[in-house]
Image (cartoon, rainbow, N blue to C red):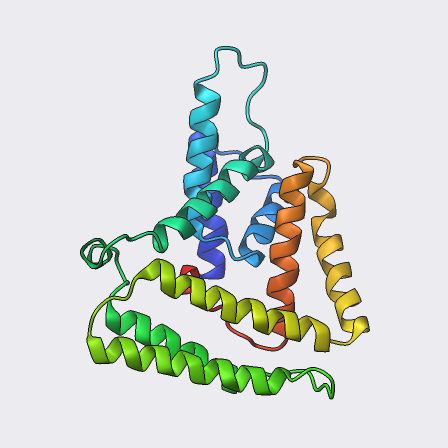
Amino acid sequence: MENYFNYFTEIEEHYQRRRGTTLMVSPLDWELIEVWKNAGIPLEAVLRGIDDAFDKYASRKRKSQKVNSLSYCTQAVLAAAEDMKEAAVGASSPEKAHHEPGFDPAHITAFLRSGADRLEKANLPQSANFPVAALARETASTLREMAASIEATAEIPRLEDLERRLTVLEEKLFAVLMAATPDDDLVEVRAQADRDLIPYRKNMPAAQIEQLQKQYIRKLILERSAIPRLSLFYMH
């Protein structure tokens, strides 16, 4: 993820340019930027979403008021993030993948092995009923096998298939982690998410709030155990 300071300043400056003003963003907008960052939305997706939102606004025949909040761009930002994820794994052939920066065998295998290393060092909750540690070790082993297979062929794998498999691995890990995490910890995480999202509920569509909340809670829970994200979306 981008440097913390740059993430905020680049979004602020880009928003100011598109709005045509040097007025500082409001505290509410500043907090919204932090929600986007904590939800794992890449800087590029935010900038693209801001452009899309302002382009759409500029095409309107009637403009009753200026865009005065970053929350106006939220739907476009989330759509841009989803488009980026689909594009990242949407190469239909090795030839196309060769033109996607970072999607070469060396980078992919390094990403998989890094995920395996981090899983083996994760701070996992102890539970007699849910085999979190065993599943983490099994997942790390699977990642290493996938990396070795790619390295052996020296070819870019079919990215849709690889992403699908990584998603399954992460979903299984997250499900067991949720089950093994003490209720008090889950309540604390949800309370933090609710507090952080309070300023945006009146300015953003309920569906978008719900989506951000789910992403944010997932990120907080994974971070508590230092479990890495496995999707190729987080490779860069």
Percent of width and height locating residue 58: 44, 20
Picture quarter with the N terminus: bottom left
Percent of width and height locating residue 150: 27, 75
Percent of width and height locating residue 49: 46, 39
Q: In this view, does 164 lie above or below 30?
A: below
Quadrant of the image occupied by residue 184: bottom right
- Seen as rendered, the residue at the extreme top is 61
Percent of width and height locating residue 30: 59, 46
The one nearer the camera, 83 or 1, is: 83
In the image, taking residue 115 as reference, residue 68 lies left or right, namely right
Quadrant of the image occupied by residue 214: bottom right
Q: How many labels does the image show?
A: 0
The one nearer the camera, 150 or 7, is: 150
Residue 236 can be seen in this image: no
Residue 128 can be seen in this image: yes
Residue pictured at 58% horizontal, 29% vertical: 68
Q: In this view, does 226 lie above or below 16?
A: below
Residue pictured at 41% horizontal, 40% vertical: 48
Picture quarter with the C terminus: bottom left
In the image, taking residue 117 as reference, residue 156 lies left or right, namely left
Q: In this view, does 147 lie above or below 221?
A: below
Residue pictured at 33% horizontal, 61% vertical: 159
The one nearer the camera, 20 or 144, is: 144
The one nearer the camera, 56 or 68, is: 56
Residue pictured at 47% horizontal, 47% vertical: 82
